[in-house]
């Protein structure tokens, strides 16, 4: 069970980690999610909207690419490959790659909701040392160059949580 004694300290620590993590991209668009949502990754499609030709395969690719992006063992090149406009965002990723906090950060994708054939909303937990630092975060994925990628919007939302956000190029 998680302690809720110091929620402000936890939030500030999480924001600091996000700035220091090369993978700071996934925290989300900071809209929150429903507390009772299922912990198992799911895919949903809003009725009447477009969706990928194979939603199950798209969901699996999104989960895999988000895990790669937030994996401390992934190289900068691997992260660039799964980030929207990754080459343009390379300096952001490189700036934080030496952080000790990066080795403790990962992500758990909880839900994928397709908003179009090339877009999806992603609900996820940003984990630090296996514990949720930013639970039920919201982010987005985009289908770019035949790959489902973590969106720049998601990366920049995380970067903006940092007190050093103005020092980060590209957002």
Image (cartoon, helix red, strand yellow):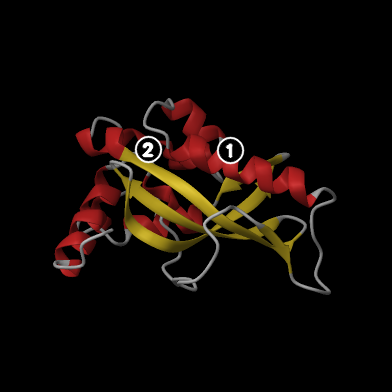
Tell me the residue that label 1 is attached to: 64
Q: Please state which of residues 120 and 108 is positioned toward the viewer in this rendering.
A: 108
Percent x, y of residue 38:
55, 62
Q: Is residue 140 left or right of residue 44?
A: left
Measure how far apart labels 1 and 2 are at the Cα level.
Answer: 19 Å
Query: Would you identify the image quadrant in which residue 7 lies?
Result: bottom left
Mark 1 or 2, closer to the camera: 1
Quarter holding the N terminus? bottom left
Crowd tier of the residue under label 1, counting other residues whose Cα lies within 10 Å: few below 14, some 14–19, many 20 or above: some
10 or 169, nearer to the observer: 10
On the rendered image, what quadrant is the C terminus found in? bottom left
Tell me the residue that label 2 is attached to. 93
Q: Are marks 1 and 2 in contact (CB under 8 Å)?
A: no
Query: What label sits on residue 164 in the rendered view?
Result: none
Q: Residue at x 85, y 50 (%)?
A: 53
Callout 2 crowding tier (Cα within 10 Å): few <14, some 14–19, many ≥20: many
Q: Residue 76: x percent and y percent?
A: 42, 29
Q: Position of residue 45 (x, y in %)?
A: 74, 65
Q: For numbered disc 1, what is the local secondary structure?
A: helix
112 horizontally vs 170: left or right: right
Compared with 41, 129 (above or below) is above
Task: Kindly identify the residue that appears in the image at 44 percent across and 51 percent down.
Answer: 26
Q: Residue at x 82, y 48 (%)?
A: 54
Q: Against 36, is 146 above or below? A: above
Q: Earlier in the sequence, mark 1 or mark 2?
A: 1
Residue depicted at x 64% and y 56%: 42
The reply, left or right, for residue 74 in relation to residue 121 is left
Q: Residue 63's quadrant in the figure? A: top right
The picture places residue 149, in percent across and down from the top left corner, at 59, 45
Q: Callout 2: helix, strand or loop? A: helix
Q: Residue furthest front?
A: 1
């Amino acid at each position: 069970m998680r302690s809720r004694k110091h929620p402000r300290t936890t939030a500030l620590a999480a924001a600091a980690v996000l700035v220091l993590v090369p993978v700071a991209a996934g925290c989300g668009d900071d809209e929150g999610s429903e507390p009772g949502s299922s912990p198992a990754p799911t895919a949903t499609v809003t009725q009447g909207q477009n969706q990928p030709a194979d939603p199950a395969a798209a969901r699996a690719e999104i989960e895999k690419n988000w895990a790669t992006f937030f994996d401390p063992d992934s190289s900068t090149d691997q992260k660039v490959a799964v980030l929207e406009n990754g080459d343009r965002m390379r300096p952001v990723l490189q700036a934080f790659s030496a952080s000790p906090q990066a080795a403790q950060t990962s992500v758990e994708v909880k839900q994928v909701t397709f908003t179009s054939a090339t877009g999806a909303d992603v609900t996820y937990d940003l984990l630090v040392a296996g514990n949720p630092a930013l639970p039920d975060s919201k982010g987005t994925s985009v289908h770019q160059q035949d790959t489902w990628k973590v969106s720049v919007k998601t990366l920049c939302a995380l970067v903006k949580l940092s007190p050093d956000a103005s020092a980060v190029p590209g957002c």
